[in-house]
């Protein structure tokens, strides 16, 4: 990609996009504040659906969607990943009686994979804002993991702040820590060069990811789980989309909302792996020390891929937090 193309990838962050007119939809029914479904209520099976946003189609997994968008739990994944990473925690979250939405971010999973596109934390947040409005998501518990945590910070403090009742950050990028030095690719800073994608073939990309992604878990990953993380990038399009994402992990963009996050007047839960080498525990400790309403929960022995290593503990923390009164 040329320098001018790369510049256009990320320039959209300062240029709010106007979505095409959408057909009128019936407004989502709003429950009175405090009138939340009882925990343990009958839950519906998880299923896939899509929503249009700007020029794109986003895919998501929904459980209990019939409960409506008010008070929903909304889940945003990391790079690499997709909505599938939340599957181990969905039953516990659905048991709260709330609707649960786990999104494939733009360029991931079954969502559209435009290239070039703005897939910075601001670009993802912009795209999700329109999707959330279409789905009538209000008074939500917003949960972001890794890259999704950076996106969640942008939504909660800027683009969707009036509808975020609670914020959860799980092993999140924050401040100027927008990427790890050697994960999910080795020498990440070099991989941000736009020319790298032109000289790397799919086999090289897959080899590098296969070598480094398991380092995100203290005990490594099963071959099946590793294949799940790698599969969507195993093509020319996949290679270009993931390299585009790497280029858009920008410290300036992540740090741009840092002061707003720590002054956020919302309940905030921080869940961190004790042995996370990708987004070190020090990030969570700093947010906890500076934020007004943050509580830090450290998961002993867990690394960055905490949803693979400690899904039950994460599910219990999320379900308890989401069930608290606003």
Image (cartoon, helix red, strand yellow):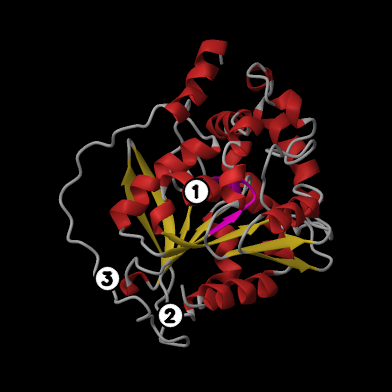
Contact between labelled residues 1 and 3, with CB atoms less than 8 Å apart: no
Q: Earlier in the sequence, mark 2 or mark 3?
A: 3
Q: Is residue 257 something that shows in the picture?
A: yes
Classify residue 36 as left or right of residue 250. left
Give yes or no for residue 147 being in the magenta stretch: yes
Vertical side of 102 occupied by 63: above or below: below
Q: Residues within 10 Å of mark 1 (few under 14, many from 20)?
A: many
Region rendered in magenta: 143-151
Contact between labelled residues 3 and 2, with CB atoms less than 8 Å apart: no
Give the residue displayed 80% in from the left and 37% down from the top: 182
* Quadrant housing residue 313: bottom right
Q: Which residue is mark 2?
A: 97
Q: Nearer the viewer, residue 59 or 282?
A: 282
Q: Nearer the viewer, mark 2 or mark 3?
A: 3
* Quadrant housing residue 136: bottom left
Q: Nearer the viewer, residue 197 or 2?
A: 2
Q: Which residue is mark 3?
A: 30
Q: Earlier in the sequence, mark 3 or mark 1?
A: 3
> Residue 143 at x, y = what percent?
55, 59
Label 2 residue SS: loop
């Amino acid at each position: 990609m040329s320098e001018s193309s790369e510049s256009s990838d990320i320039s959209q962050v300062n240029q709010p996009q106007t979505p095409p007119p959408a057909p009128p939809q019936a407004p989502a029914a709003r429950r009175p504040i405090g009138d939340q479904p009882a925990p343990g209520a009958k839950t519906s099976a998880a299923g896939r659906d899509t929503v249009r946003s700007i020029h794109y189609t986003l895919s998501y997994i929904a459980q209990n969607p019939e409960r409506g968008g008010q008070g929903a739990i909304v889940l945003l994944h990391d790079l690499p990943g997709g909505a599938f990473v939340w599957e181990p925690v969905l039953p516990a979250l659905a048991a709260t009686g709330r609707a649960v939405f786990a999104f494939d971010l733009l360029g991931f999973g079954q969502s559209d994979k435009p290239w070039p596109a703005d897939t910075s934390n601001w670009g993802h947040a912009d795209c999700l804002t329109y999707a959330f409005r279409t789905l009538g998501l209000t008074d939500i518990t917003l949960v972001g993991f890794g890259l999704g945590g950076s996106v969640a910070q942008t939504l909660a403090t800027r683009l969707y702040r009036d509808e975020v009742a609670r914020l959860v950050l799980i092993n999140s990028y924050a401040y100027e820590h927008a990427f790890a030095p050697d994960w999910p690719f080795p020498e990440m800073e070099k991989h941000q060069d736009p020319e790298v994608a032109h000289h790397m073939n799919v086999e090289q990309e897959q080899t590098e990811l296969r070598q480094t992604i398991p380092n995100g878990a203290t005990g490594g990953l099963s071959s099946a789980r590793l294949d799940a993380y790698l599969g969507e990038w195993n093509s020319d399009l996949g290679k270009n989309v993931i390299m585009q994402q790497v280029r858009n992990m920008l410290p300036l963009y992540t740090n741009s909302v840092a002061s707003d996050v720590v002054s956020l007047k919302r309940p905030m839960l921080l869940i961190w792996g004790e042995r996370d080498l990708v987004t070190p525990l020090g990030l969570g400790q700093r947010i906890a020390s500076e934020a007004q309403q943050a509580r830090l929960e450290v998961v002993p022995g867990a690394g960055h891929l905490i949803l693979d290593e400690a899904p039950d503990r994460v599910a219990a923390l999320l379900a308890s937090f989401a069930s608290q009164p606003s």
